[in-house]
Each structure stands twice: as C-alpha cells, then as structure tokens.
Image (cartoon, rainbow, N blue to C red):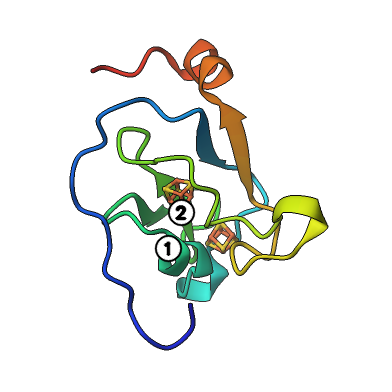
Amino acid sequence: MATKEKAKRNVQRKRKPKLMAVINEACTGCAGSPICITECPVDNCMFEVENEHAPAFNLVYVDPLLCIGCKKCISKGPMDTFLEGCPWDAIDMIPIEAYELEYGSLPY
Ligand code: SF4
Ligand code: SF4
C-alpha cells in the first residue's frame, strides 16, 4: 500500500492466531515513518515506542492481543516473493506455542 490509507480492522480478534509478529533488535524505527505500521491491517496493533537504548529513535511494538498473524508487516512472501513490509528483516513471525512459552499465555 502506498498512497491511500486502507480501512483497518478494528474488531477484537476472537481466536489466537497461529503465528505472532514480534519485533527484533534489527528494528530501526524507520526514521519515524514505519512501513510496517502502514501495512498492518489491524487498527492500533503496531505502534511506536521509545527506544530506551537510543532515545532519539523509536521502535515498533506489536500488541499481542491484536495481531492476527497475517504477515503483511514482513517482506518475505510465499515462494521467495517480496512483500511491502519491513525491509530490514526486523519482524519475526513466531508460532503461537513458542510465543506463549517465551512471553506467557495470552489471556482470553
Ligand atoms: S502479522 Fe499482521 S496483524 Fe500482526 S503485526 Fe503483522 S501485519 Fe499486523
Ligand atoms: S519493524 Fe521494520 S518496518 Fe517497522 S519500524 Fe522497525 S525497521 Fe521499520
């Protein structure tokens, strides 16, 4: 998506997704214009937070209760195609079981 803002999903997710997006240490904050947030179809799912290691820059955070695991925020598509998401490989798509082992069970 480039010029026009898409209508974003704003209803609460009903089930846990199979995959969860997690921002890794490669996130640069995209100089205040995060491509990932533009691509995410869910309202308020991704948002900027202060980078405590570099206060002049922001990082992106994914709300685990809103992410639907759609992979639109990443740039690796099926069969090695290239999507319009994060160009810096800064988002890992993690199976929900591994996510909950690492971060705790998601409340539903
Ligand atoms: S996987 Fe989909 S819903 Fe989750 S953060 Fe990425 S674009 Fe948003
Ligand atoms: S996750 Fe990627 S696209 Fe999003 S702000 Fe960080 S570097 Fe930019």
At label 2, counting other C-alpha atoms closer than 10 Å, the crowd grade (few under 14, some 14-19, many 20 or more) is many
Ligand 2 contact, mark 1 (Cβ < 8 Å): yes
Q: Which mark is residue 37?
A: 1
Residue closer to the observer: 73 or 32: 73
Residue drawn at x 50%, y 64% is 57
Figure check: 85 above or below 97: below
> On the rendered structure, is 8 left or right of 88?
left
Q: Are marks 2 and 1 in contact (CB under 8 Å)?
A: yes
SS class of the residue under badge 1?
helix
Q: Position of residue 50 (x, y in %)?
A: 40, 54
* Circle 1: residue type: Ile
Q: Quadrant of the rendered structure where residue 40 is?
A: bottom left
> On the rendered structure, is 13 left or right of 19?
left
Residue closer to the observer: 91 or 96: 96
Residue named by callout 2: 60
Ligand 2 contact, mark 2 (Cβ < 8 Å): yes
Name the outermost residue toward the bottom: 3
